[in-house]
Amino acid sequence: MPVLGLVLCLLSGCTSMRAICPAEGGRPWVEVRSPHFSVRTNLDGDTAQEAARELELLRQGLLQAWAGTFDPPGTVEVIVLRNHTALEEFTNVRIEGFSATTQDGPVLVLAGNAYALSEAPADVGTQAHELTHYLSEFALVRQPRWLSEGLAAYLESIDLRPEKHEVILGGLHTGFLGHVQRNGWRSLSELWEWDGKGLLGTAESRNYYASSWLWVHFFISRHPERFDDFQTRLMSGEEPRAAWEESFRGVKDLVGELHAYVHGGRHVVYPTITAPLVPVTSPLHMRALEPAEVHAIRAQLYLMTPGAASPEERFHHAEQEMAQALKEDPGNVAATLLRIRSTADPSRRLGLAQQLVERHPDSGQAWDAMAQALDAAGNTSEEQEAARLRAVELLPDSVSAQNGLAGFYARTSQPEKGLAAARRAVALAPGNPAVLDTWSTILFQLGRCPEALSTQQLAADTLHESTPERLRRTVHDALARYEAVCGPASPSPTAAPGVPMAPAPSGL
């Protein structure tokens, strides 16, 4: 029986609805590791392990959207809270979950559905949506927002059928279909402009999401070969608008076709895609989390969850959690990392990082924090290089460690040494603008001007509204500098390393 997003809540006076540590009356927390996920949760152990297995199955099913032509590296961190009430403590709004990108990589935060002594059908829509965003970056690094959100919404309706060893993709999103039937939809021209818009109101935002789902579902159903060609061009690194024009050249009256697709009634056929699904047999590893680790998770949630809380309010709550974590365990890695990253004073950061390395000499995260603290303090000596090399040795799949090492060699004008780390960072995070910026710097220093320019253009294309302003300026300034030296960017830039040069997706 599926349990992902499903929680059995016992009517017990000692069971807290808040996601707190057992020492404060909360439920026990565990961490379950599978090949592609690290699940930290206050679900019971058996349910947590089943959730990890289902995430692996969900990942496998979603990859069939690209015919299983690639298998992205790295591990996704997942925090699963037992119910919506637990998540609302951090967001102040009712949401099913969200995704975020942290210094340590992608994070999915999910809430279960709790009902007193009862069960509810598992809903993997949110999990599928957020995981699709992560996976699609490996296949389609250069994707306009309407395509990114449209594909994620398209795959929300994924139907896993492990008993039949199959997965069905492309079922109707009845909520979005009803929305566009009642309220109309955005034109494709309007959707192309979505990337440049700021935050939208709830109603307008829903219309953009529903419209994106509609166009993607329509293209997959009515123009599959052209849509496959469009995605294949994006896989090869072509500029999205130019790729679109080429793939759909000569097509007439898309507007009329779409109107009939929405309002054609019972005569309209909405096809689905059936693909194979292999049973998940990978081993799992589970351990109990210490109280300090739970407080560190709570601090992390306060800092990164969406909602209207001010930065000051978020930091106040996070500071309390960090303090309690370090009181429970002065050497706790997760809590100390948060403390280091929230400390502005370079000398203080360096002192904390040195203490962390002394306590945990086998922690890659500790060495990575040490290297960053040395860099912030202006130290570009062999000491920083040694710390970064040690971090990469201990954390070969860490985007932060690999990109940090490549960046160090770029800043010290040793691009040959940084080449391997830069390639690995892009393979791990092909849609990360900071990673692409480092890779382009290495290429530029090596004299590979056209590649540096096309990669920097790709970095600019991956910027979005939540990108920090400092990084945004860095990317655009470097792009202008490369254009001045190398000439204008090619209309069809070379794909970055790690972007699969795959054949057209099956059905998508």
Image (cartoon, rainbow, N blue to C red):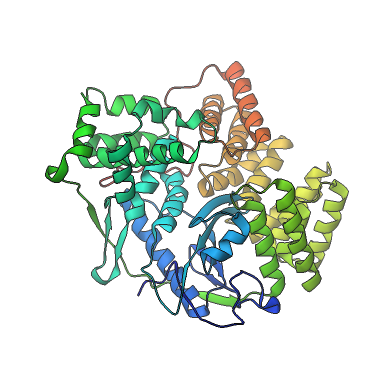
**Residue occupying image coordinates x 22% and y 36%:** 223
Q: Is residue 127 above or below residue 260?
A: below
Quadrant including the N terminus:
bottom left
From the viewer's perspective, tell me whether residue 65 is left or right of residue 131. left
From the viewer's perspective, tell me whether residue 482 is left or right of residue 462. right
Q: Position of residue 95 (x, y in %)?
A: 50, 55
Q: Is residue 40 above or below residue 287?
A: above
Q: Position of residue 259 (x, y in %)?
A: 22, 33
**Residue occupying image coordinates x 34% and y 59%:** 61
Q: Is residue 129 in sight in this rendering?
A: yes
* Direction left: furthest residue: 267
Q: Position of residue 475 (x, y in %)?
A: 62, 30
Q: Position of residue 13 (x, y in %)?
A: 59, 82
Among the 4 quarters of the image, the one containing residue 71: bottom left
Quadrant including the C terminus:
top left
Camera-nearest residue between 434 and 396 = 434
Q: Is residue 24 above or below residue 199?
A: below
**Residue occupying image coordinates x 50% and y 81%:** 10
Q: Is residue 446 above or below residue 497?
A: above
**Residue occupying image coordinates x 38% and y 65%:** 57
Q: How many marks?
A: 0
Q: Is residue 143 in sight in this rendering?
A: no
Camera-nearest residue between 487 and 46 = 46
